[in-house]
Amino acid sequence: MAKTVAKPDRKSRLKKPARTPMLGGPTRAELYERARMRDIIGASRMTKDELLLALRTH
């Protein structure tokens, strides 16, 4: 008899694994605040990596 494995539900498949924060690096909230101060458009929808890039290029 073959064992059947239940598929994970949609929500658990869509969740991204939590990343460990960079040691000593700014949090996303801190980066967002800096981006907001520089009037970077779309900052609220950016990821931490995108905020870092936007802050470096503006």
Image (tube, rainbow, N blue to C red):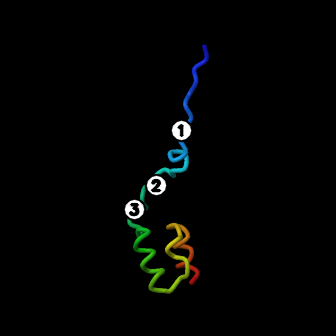
Q: Which residue is drawn at 61% across and 17% down?
A: 2
Identify residue for label 3.
23
User: Hey, which residue is sitting farthest front in the picture?
Assistant: 10
Task: Measure the alpha-carbon separation of dots 1 and 3.
Answer: 32 Å
Query: Is label 2 in a helix, a strand or a loop?
Result: loop
Is the N terminus in the top left, top right, bottom left or bottom right quadrant? top right
Identify residue for label 2.
19
User: Hey, which residue is sitting farthest top in the picture?
Assistant: 1
Task: Measure the alpha-carbon separation of dots 2 and 3.
Answer: 12 Å
Query: Is label 3 in a helix, a strand or a loop?
Result: loop
Residue 54 rendering spot, x and y as whole percentages: 56, 77
Q: Residue at x 53, y 67 (%)?
A: 49
Identify residue for label 1.
8
Task: Measure the alpha-carbon separation of dots 2 and 1.
Answer: 21 Å
Count of marks, rendered view: 3
Pick whichever of labels 1 and 3 is earlier in the sequence.
Answer: 1
Q: What residue type is labelled 1?
A: Pro
Residue 42 rendering spot, x and y as whole percentages: 55, 77
